[in-house]
Amino acid sequence: MKTIIEPFRIKSVEPIYFTTKEQRKEILQKADYNSFRIHANDVLIDLLTDSGTSAMSSNQWAGIMQGDESYAGSSSFFKFEESVRSITGMPYIIPTHQGRAAEKIIFTILGGNGKYFISNTLFDTTRANIEFSGAEGIDCLCAEGKKPTVPAPFKGNMDTGLLRKTIEAKGAANIPMVIITITNNSGGGQPVSMQNIKDTRAICDEYNIPLFIDACRFAENAWFIKLREEGYADRSVPEIAREIFSYADGCTMSAKKDAFANIGGFLAMRNLELAMRCRNLLIITEGFTTYGGLAGRDLEAIAIGLQEVMDEHYLQYRIRSIEYLTNKLIDAGVPVMQPAGGHAVYLDAKAFLPNIPVDQYPGQSLVCALYEEGGIRAVEIGSLMFGKYDEQGKLVPAQMELVRLAVPRRVYTQSHIDYVAEVIIDVFNRRSELGGLVITEETPLLRHFTAKLKPV
Ligand code: F0G
C-alpha cells in the first residue's frame, strides 16, 4: 500500500509564527499558564481546537461569493436546508450561529429543574447549557471508554445497561432527551457503533424518550463504522450517515467541525411542534428562521462543506493523519489514548506525569510544556476543564486527565505533524523536570477558558 496523501493541493497559504523558547517562557507567564490566553500570533502549530479552524475549499470560497444576504427566504438558506436534509432526513432544519446556540435553544425549551439529560458523554458547552437551564447532565460511557490506553473499536459507545438503570432511577418522565455525541469528543474522539445507536434507540422507544445526536463529527464517526463495523465496509459514507440519523428524533450540530465552516451550526428535528418552539426562541436570540445568526455566505459554505466532508479520500486521509501521529507517539512509549480518535490525539497526562497530583493539574502542566518546548498549543481535558469542588472546597477530579491535540481539517501537512511528534517526545524525555500548577483565579462555569494559574 502506498502512502496516503493529502487529497488536495494548496492554492492559498498563511504564515505561521516562530518564537524562541525564552520568549515562550515569558508569554506563558503573561498568559497565566492558560493556553486560551495566549495570542494566536505567538503560536507555531495551533492544535487548540479543530473547531472553526478548517481550511475551506475553493468551492466553499466560491459559494461565499454567491451568498444571498436577503433577510428572509435567502436562496442560500434553501441550499443549506437541502444539504442538511439530504444527510439527516429530517424535515425541520434551524440554522444557528454555532453548536452551542443550538444547545441553548433546545435545552432552554426542554430543560429546567428536576430534568435529566443522559448521554454517552456530554461536551462541556452541552453540559453547561443543560446545567444553566437548571437540569442535570449524566454521562453513561461504556467501561472501555474510560481506559485511555486500552484499545477497543467503539470506545464512544453508550453503556446501555447503565442507561436503562439511570432512566429507571430518575424516572422516564423527567428525562426529556437522550443524547449521543458522535464522535465522543471529551472521551478521546472515539466513535459510536451503529449497533450501539440502534440499541440506544430501542431503549428510548421503550421509555418513550426522544433520541438526539450531537452530530459535530458525524462523517468521521461514519468512516469508523465503515472501517470497523461488520456489514458496513461496502456501504457509502452518505448511506451510513443517513442510517445513523434515521435512528434519531433530532440533532444538534456545530458546522465548525465536519462542515469545514469557520462559523455556523444547526438544529434538525422531526417534530413540528418542537420545531415551532425552537424557531420562536431562535427569532428572539439568533435571528430569523432562514438565517439564524449567520450570513447567507456562511450558509453556502456549510451547505457545500457538509457534502465535501463525506468524500472517502478525504476521510481516509483525515483518520490516517491522526493515526500516524498516534502511532509515532506509541512507538516512543508516550502514553496516548488508543486507538487513535477521529479529530485529535489525546495524551494521558496521568500516566505521562505520574509525579504531579491531580489537584496540581498534570494535564495543564503538559499543555504548558508543549508550548514552551515547541510553540504547540493544545488543551487540557481533565480536572481543569471538568473538576468540581465538594462542600469542603476539595477538588473532585475528572475521570481522566487528558491533553488534546486537535488537528484542524486540511490545514497542516505531514511535516507539521512530524514536528509535533518530535516536540511531544522531547517533553516526554524530560518529563521528570515538570512541576504542577495551582489556580489563582477562576469562574464558576467553564472555568478552563479564563482561569489563571501559576507554577506550584
Ligand atoms: N458538541 C461537541 C461534541 C463539540 O465538540 C462542540 C465544540 C460543541 C458541541 C459546541 O459547538 O463550538 O460550535 O458551539 N467543540 C469545540 C472543541 C469547541 O474545541 O472541541 P460550538
Image: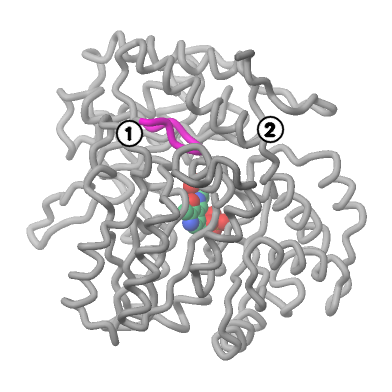
Three-letter amino acid code of the residue under disc 2: His
Residue denoted by label 2: 313
The residue shown at (37%, 80%) is: 209
Q: Quadrant of residue 1?
A: top right
- The relative height of residue 453 versus residue 219 in the rendered view (above or below) is above
The outermost residue toward the bottom is 273
- The relative height of residue 404 versus residue 295 in the rendered view (above or below) is above
Label 1 or label 2, whichever lies nearer to me, is 2
Task: Give x and y (percent) for residue 440.
Answer: 28, 43
Q: What stretch is highlighted in magenta?
A: 339-346
The residue shown at (80%, 69%) is: 77
Say what secondary structure mark 1 lies in. Answer: helix
Task: Give x and y (percent) for residue 106.
Answer: 50, 76
Colour scheme in use? one colour
Q: Which of pointers 1 and 2 lies earlier in the amino acid sequence?
A: 2
Q: Which numbered circle lies on residue 248? A: none
Q: Which numbered circle lies on residue 364? A: 1
The residue shown at (30%, 8%) is: 429
Residue placed most toward the observer, 14 or 206: 206
State left or right for residue 246 relative to residue 113.
Answer: right
Distance from mark 1 CB to nearest ligand 1 atom below 8 Å: no
Q: Quadrant of residue 55?
A: top right
